[in-house]
Amino acid sequence: MNNNFDFIIRPNKKVTTFISEIWEYRDLFYFLALRDFKVRYKQTIVGSLWAILRPLMTMLVFTIVFGKIAALPSQGQAPYSILVFSAMLPWFFFSSSFQDGSNALVSNANMISKIYFPRIIIPISSLFVNAVDFIISFFLLLLLMIFLQYPPTYKIIALPVFFLISAAFTGAAIIWMSALNVKYRDIRYIIPFIVQFGLFISPVGFSSTVMSNEWRYVYSLNPLVGIIDGFRWSILDENVSFYWPGFFLSIFVTIALLFTGYLYFRKTENKFADII
C-alpha cells in the first residue's frame, strides 16, 4: 500500500468566506503594512520628511510649468498651487501604491511558497502604507490653504467618499498587475511606464475643464479623471462645478476593473506558489 499523498490547500471561492478569511488574517495584514512602513524611508537622509518634500517639490514644478509658463486657467477662485496640490493627493496615493503593490507578490516569494494565507493581503497592504503619506499630504494642503487664505468649504466633508473610490480603483489596478506579474515578469518593466504615462493623461498639473465637452466624457474613461475632479470639487471653493457624467463613467470603469481583477486573482492564486 502506498502511503505517499499530496495535501493540497485550495482557496475558498465564496466572496463572503473570502472576506471573513481576510479578517481572520488581519494580524498578518497589520504586520506587513507596519513592516513596509518601517523600511519605506530607511537609509534615507531626511527619512519620513520625503512624505512632505515630494508633493511640495512636484507642486512647485507643476505650478511654474502649467500655471506660469503655459498660463493654463485654474478653477473657481483657487490659487493654481491649490489646484495642483488637490490633484496630487489621489495621484501620489495611486502611483506609490500601484508600484509597491504590483511587485509585492514577487518580492515576498519566500513567504508565499512556504505557508498558506490569503495571497491578496500582500499587494493590498500597500494601500494602508501609502494612506499614511496621504494623510500627511492632506494636512500639508490644509496648512497651504491657511497660508494662502483660501479656506475649505462645507464640501470637504465629501472627501472621504472620493478617497474610498480612489482606494477601490488603486486596489483594482494592484490586484490585476500583481497577479499578472507573477506569470509575466515583463510587467515589472511596464509598471514604471504606466505610471509615467498615467501622469501625462491625468489632470494632475491642469484642470480637466481645458478639455472640450465632446472629448471630456471620453477622457473620463481614465478613472483618475473622475477621482481627481471629485477631490477638486470637495476641496476648492463653491464656484467649482462637478462633471457628473464623467464621474459616473469613472465609477463604472472602476467597478468593472475591481470585479474582473478579483475574478482573475482568485482564478490564478492557487498556482502562485508553483510559478513564483
Image: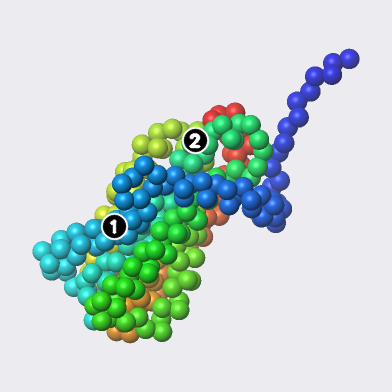
- 166 relative position to 29: left or right: left
- Residue 269 or residue 145, whichever sits in front: 145
Above/below status of 224 relative to 29? below
Tell me the kind of residue under disc 2.
Val
Q: Residue at x 41, y 69 (%)?
A: 247
Q: Which residue is mark 2?
A: 106
The picture quadrant where one finds residue 193 is top left
Tell me the kind of residue under disc 1.
Leu
Residue 20 is tagged as: none
Above/below status of 182 relative to 260? above
Above/below status of 249 relative to 260? below
Q: Residue at x 28, y 72 (%)?
A: 144
The picture quadrant where one finds residue 66 is bottom left
- Residue 256 or residue 153, whichever sits in front: 153
- 128 relative position to 149: left or right: right
Q: Which residue is mark 1?
A: 53
The image position of residue 81, as x and y in percent, is: 23, 69
How far, Cα to Cα, is label 2 from label 1? 29 Å
Would you call the spot at circle 1 few (<14 residues within 10 Å), some (14-19), or many (20 or more)?
few
The image position of residue 78, as x and y in percent, is: 25, 77
